[in-house]
Image (tube, rainbow, N blue to C red):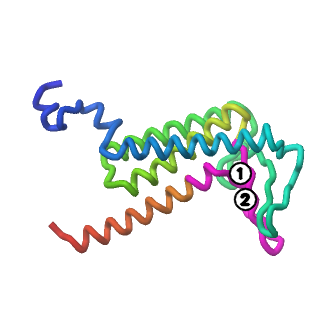
Amino acid sequence: MSTADEDRSGGRSRLSRWFWGPHAALALKVAAAVFLIDQAHKWWMLLIYRIAEKGRVEITPFLDLVFVKNTGISYSMLDQSGQGWQNVLALFAVVASLALWVWLSVAGTGRLMAIALGLIIGGAIGNGLDRLLIGGVADFFSLHAFGYYWYVFNIADVAIVAGVVALLYDSIVGSRNDAANPM
């Protein structure tokens, strides 16, 4: 790499810009926190609380705890229990997380985007690890009302959904701010 390339990038190599941007530290902290909380909760539910032996546990009139091993993707779509398929889905989680990380490093626009992508990456990696270790994603929370049950989910799923909502909010607010402040 030439000195001119390093000068234009603030002393950083072109390759390092792809993997470490101005908001990378915040995203890494969020992703690590989500991953650790999610995995600690899952293993506590499985090994200490032993939810699989208890069946459905009513917490409130609209929330139950239950163990479901999801071998598909959202809402059990593409459901296949073979470990080869679980490895493919785990690899997809890693590839998608790397793509989101590069997006953040190269084009990250601020703290909200870093938090949002950290939530998504931490959740995706947590669910991906489940696929490798137990052959599917461990889900526990079951919301229901008036005889209708929604899907069963976990902390990683909540983080992913919150991250997507935050990204949408950031894109809408960012777009409105850009339109209001033309250069």
Secondary structure character of the magenta stretch overall: strand
Quadrant in which residue 90 is drawn: top right
Give the answer, above or below, for where 40 lies relative to 166.
Answer: above
Q: Which residues are magenta?
A: 137-159
Report the front residue among 121 and 45. 45
- How many angstroms separate mark 2 from mark 1 (CA)? 9 Å
- Could you tell me the amino acid type at mark 2? Tyr
For marks 2 and 1 on the same chain, the one whose residue lies earlier in the sequence: 1
Report the front residue among 159 and 82. 159
Image quadrant occupied by the C terminus: bottom left
Instruction: Give the image location of residue 91, x and y in percent.
Output: 56, 34
How busy is the neighbourhood of tag 1: few (under 14 within 10 Å), some, or many (20 plus)?
Answer: few
Tell me, yes or no, whether the highlighted magenta stretch contains residue 97: no
Q: Which residue is mark 2?
A: 151
Quadrant in which residue 171 is drawn: bottom left
57 left or right, relative to 69: right
